[in-house]
Image (spheres, coloured by chain):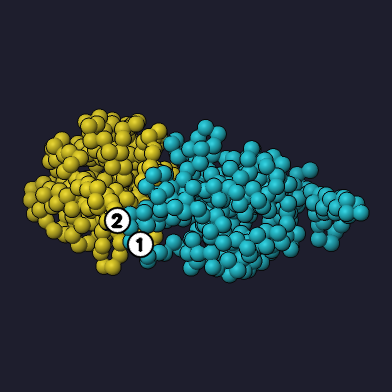
Amino acid sequence: MKHTVSLLLCVLLALTSCKTMEGPGNGIELPRPKVALVLGGGAARGFAHIGVIRALEQEKIPIDMVVGTSVGSLIGAIYAADRNSFELEWTAFTLEKETLFDYGIMNAFTGMGIAKGDKLEEFVKSKITIANIEGLMIPYAAVATDLNRGERVVLERGSVAKAVRASSAIPGVFQPVNHLGRNLVDGGVMDNIPVAVARERGADLIIAVDISENVTNFNLTNLLDVMLQSITIMGAENAKARKKDADVLIAPAVGDVGMLDFTQKKRCMQAGIEATQKAMPEIKAKIEEWGRKRLAQK
Amino acid sequence: MDIKKILSYFSKTKEGPQPKIALVLGGGSARGFAHIGVIRVLEKENIPVDMIIGTSVGSLIGAIYAYDVNSFELEWSAFSLERDDIFDYGLVTAFTGMGAAKGEKLEAFVRSKIPIENIEDLKIPFAAVATDLKQGKRVVLDRGPVARAVRASCAIPGVFQPVEQDGRLLVDGGVVDNIPVSVARERGADIIIAVDIGVSIENNDISNLFEVVLQSIQIMAAENVKVKAKEADVLISPALGKVGMMDFSKKKLCMQAGIEATQKALPAIKDKIDAWRRS
């Protein structure tokens, strides 16, 4: 019985996600664009991404591809695994800073980052039972940085957990990740809002979520604080230029939430929902516009 | 008014209106010796420089030149400059303070080269770009003590301690804008010549937390430049290859590269000036 129900659900899902959309009122089905959701970096502010996904789901905006940097790769992977924004919310509700950060003061002196990142990888494995990116329900890519060469690395195959861990390895906070013969750190070093990656992979319409704005921090006391704040500022500068290339930019009002503040998750999600609702008319108009143009070309 | 100024006044009126030309000098530590070669060629070709905007090492070279508009003096300052003249490293400062080097030596060096106090008194209008670390904002230093401004603009995060000023913590301008073309534009420049000395990114010798973060900062600065350099009217990119950011032994090579790149850019510069005059 359970199997029949899930089979039915699958068929239903397949039908609803069929690549056509009804044109308003005229009965002609408009072709629909390949929609990419690009989730930017910004550590704990990333809870806002969950609100965005919830609102997109509610309005039945299809998501054909998810590309994420840093926390965007984490949230994106969990969603890409089973398209279930409720699970995502529950995960967020139970998530604490300690679930992800395996800090150790000694690591700072003996290693290449304060936190190892093992915990983060374990967390991803516990949430996503699919081992490889190829097995995810939605095509997905995480963006990381090759630290030695200063190159953008797009992780779109192989271990999901490793990819998320590498993409989230904020320099100085997490240790770099040895993966695919490279030393990888946070994708935000090269591209904090990877609109370009989605474009290169054939997205027709890119919805990007920016959580990098406002980097004010008055609590700087040591060398590491100085360097990390510099990196945060640089990540925001990087995003400024890149987010312009998105078709629709959603910028939840999370500017006053600290990058490592896990106490504001509900508010961040709320901000994500609100910003997405505000962007909804634009999203729908652009989807329709794309469809009409495509129809006219035929 | 000296005779040179009177002569240049007449030559200007003879040729009609002159565009306001800005020289924008980017960051890149020891690769900055290339800026000196660029200035040498511009001076030789009588390209007037009406404004200098610099980030990091660009602010250092720019300030010295803006003081007495003498590329010969600048060259000789560079010839004798050693790493230890600028970096006052201390192992202890790394743990007790907010940077490995204090920056006092750098400030003293600037004072020894520029015997006047304030930016307002430099011969060529000058501005140094720094970053307000707490607020993550660009700060344009165009007034007040020259040496302090240069020190702040050069304060590479983690390498130099931030500079406290008016309650702000200032670090290297490269954190927000490593090639400040936009500053020149905001100040009314008609033609902007920008010098990108880039960074040598590849580094296979990263073994501790400090190096991880520093390398990340350099990669990010290079990405930032890719976007901002496009706004220049003429971009000069000396071929510096793999000269390391802290390698003071390649200064002659850097200057030579600056000279060659500028010679190559001369036709473009002259075209831009002509086009401005015609419009």
Residue A70: where, in percent of width, then height?
Answer: 54, 50
Residue found 11% across the figure and 56% down from its top = B116
Q: Is residue A282 above or below residue A204?
A: below
Q: Are marks 2 and 1 in contact (CB under 8 Å)?
A: yes
Q: Nearer the viewer, residue A156 or B58?
A: A156
Residue type indicated by callout 2: Met
Q: Which mark is residue B110?
A: none
Whether residue B26 appears in this view of the structure is: yes
The tint of chain B in the picture is: yellow
Task: Please determine whether, in this image, residue A86 is positioned above or below residue A168.
Answer: below
Quadrant (top left, top right, bottom left, bottom right) of the N terminus of chain A: bottom right
| Chain letter for the cyan colouring in the rendering | A
- Disc 2 to disc 1, C-alpha distance: 9 Å
Identity of the residue drawn at 70% across and 44% down? A130
Residue for point 51% across, 55% down: A101
The part of the image, by quadrant, that contains residue B36 is: top left
Q: Secondary structure at mark 2?
A: loop
Asked if badges 2 and 1 are on one and the same chain, I answer no
The quarter of the picture where residue A110 lies is: top left
Which residue in the protein does label 2 denote?
A: B98
Q: Which residue is mark 1?
A: A220
Across and down, in percent, residue A27 comes to: 87, 57
Q: In front: B117, or A164?
A: A164
Chain ID of residue with mark 1: A
